[in-house]
Image (cartoon, rainbow, N blue to C red):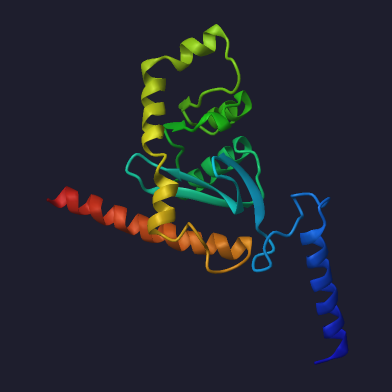
Amino acid sequence: MPARWTRRRSISTTNRTYRRVRPTVSTATRLVSLHDPDARPIAKGRIGKPVEFGYKAQVVDNADGIVLDYDIAEGNPADAPRLPPAIERIIRRVGAPPNAATADRGYGQAAVENQLHDLGVRTVAIPRKGQPGAARRAHEHRPGFRKLIKWRTGSEGRISHLKHRYGWARTAIAGRERTATWCGHGILAHNLVKITALAAAETA
């Protein structure tokens, strides 16, 4: 092999080792996997497993359980700013905004709610972070709001289902882009099963 290629490889390996073992390296750049250099530590706060290593996924599904959009992000980005772009992608695909949108408290920001309304979403049911005022509390206790929140709670198992049935628990290929492709195949398989079941139910 050419000496030049060997030197580059040696430098790359040294840098990876340095990034992995040096304790002061930021978690944003620290290498946690020699197999997948894009993977990052993600704090989950679970008992016995407070930190996991990989990517942060976001899934948007509809009332039929069909996944309309997904996103695989490197590191541990904030949830809230990721929702409006997801709704924009859905609008481009189907040609119209959803009538309603709901999400967990991690997305609960006034700016996000305003962005969704600007995109044409009529009803937004996302609990706000912190201690809401009296008017906001009254809004979140309205029957329509609570109904959407209950539906969201019931759909929380979507990612867990994707992990256990469609390969989302562990990717067999490295890199964020390749992982996104891997997860996309899982989404395709999941949606095909869902659509087939819905079609069978309609013809029964």
Is any atom of residue 156 visible in this view?
Answer: yes
- Image-quadrant location for residue 164: bottom left
Q: Is residue 74 left or right of residue 47?
A: right
- Image-quadrant location for residue 129: top right
Residue drawn at (19%, 54%), measured in percent from left and top? 200
- Image-quadrant location for residue 37: bottom right
As drawn, 62 above or below 33:
above
Q: Is residue 35 left or right of residue 166?
A: right
Residue drawn at (47%, 57%), measured in percent from left and top? 168
For this orientation, the residue located farthest to the front is 48
Query: How far across and how far down the image is residue 3, in percent?
Result: 87, 89
Query: How far across and how far down the image is residue 122, in percent?
Result: 46, 27
Query: How far across and how far down the image is residue 27, in percent?
Result: 74, 49
60, 31: nearer the viewer: 31
For this orientation, the residue located farthest to the bottom is 1
117, 155: nearer the viewer: 155
Residue drawn at (43%, 36%), measured in percent from left and top? 98
Label count reads 0
Q: Is residue 17 left or right of residue 144?
A: right
142, 154: nearer the viewer: 154
**Quarter that holds the N terminus:** bottom right
For this orientation, the residue located farthest to the left is 204
As drawn, 124 above or below 11:
above
Is any atom of residue 118 visible in this view?
Answer: no
Residue drawn at (37%, 20%), measured in percent from left and top? 144
Query: How far across and how far down the image is residue 99, in percent?
Result: 41, 32
Q: Is residue 203 left or right of residue 146?
A: left
